[in-house]
Amino acid sequence: MDKARIAVLVSGGGTNLQALLDAQGDVITSGEITLVISNKAGAYALERARLAGVKGETVLRRECGSQEAFEDKVLSLLRENNIDMIVLAGFLSVLSERFVKEYPNRIINIHPSLIPKHCGDGFYGLKVHESVLAAGDKVTGATVHFVNEITDGGEIIFQQEVPVMEGDTPEVLQKRVMEQAEWIILPKACEQVSKKIVEESK
Ligand code: GAR
């Protein structure tokens, strides 16, 4: 295999997806984003995929009837598209152990805090930054990690610290964490894992 085929799973605006698309051919040379799957209808991330010429699919849990049926649909799309690696980039649904075991060490997630702080069930999006500010932390950041059966519990690949400033709102802090950490370490981690997949295929 020349390049690992990457699927990016999203739920919202997709700025992390954009960082990955922009890093292709630069930071990311061992992988290619070939599929974007959203679990929210009309997510702007799908528009970003379309503009980049990447296939986009929407799978809605409520239309599938159960989490199991939802995951089966996602798994069948991944198989149909010969996906080697999955990136959760602002994907706000927790995947089951059964799903995760289909792609051992091949699913990575970006989380907007320094794990083990401010993570686990219920910590996503702005809630994470609200928690950091409520705790009075002076430093926060982002973490890219492998996904296993424990929410935000898999092996850490990269972490990047970001300062918390006097007067920060959750929105201001979220933006700083994205710009100074998430958009940098996610493409780097994506390349590291893709490269290993390509090497293992030889
Ligand atoms: C990002 O900050 C990402 O780290 C976070 O959601 C945001 C999605 O933004 N993910 C989590 O909180 C996962 N627990 P994006 O759609 O613009 O990439």
Image (cartoon, grey):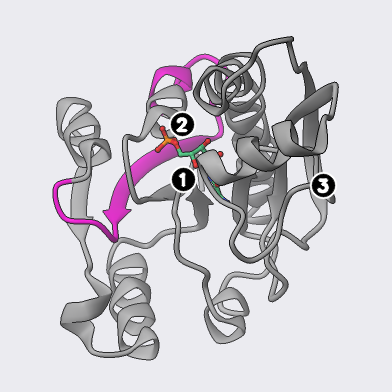
How many residues crowd around disc 3 within 10 Å: few (fewer than 14), some, or many (20 or more)? few
Whether disc 1's CB lies below 8 Å from ligand 1 is answered yes
How many residues crowd around disc 1 within 10 Å: few (fewer than 14), some, or many (20 or more)? many
Which quarter of the figure has residue 67? Answer: bottom left
Is residue 64 within the magenta segment?
no
Residue 30 percent location from the top left of the image: 56, 33
Q: Which residue corresponds to the image point at 66% horizontal and 22% vertical from the top-left?
A: 181
Report which residue position mark 3 lands on: 117
Mark toward the start of the polypeptide (3 vs 1): 1
Q: Secondary structure at mark 2?
A: helix
The label number, if any, that marks residue 16 in the structure image: 2
Whether disc 2's CB lies below 8 Å from ligand 1 is answered yes
Q: CA distance from mark 1 to mark 2?
A: 7 Å
- Quick check: 17 left or right of 65? right
Mark toward the start of the polypeptide (1 vs 2): 2
Q: Which residue corresponds to the image point at 84% horizontal and 51% vertical from the top-left?
A: 116
The label number, if any, that marks residue 122 in the structure image: none
Q: Nearer the viewer, residue 99 or 198?
A: 99
Q: CA distance from mark 3 to mark 1?
A: 18 Å
- Amino acid at pointer 3: Lys
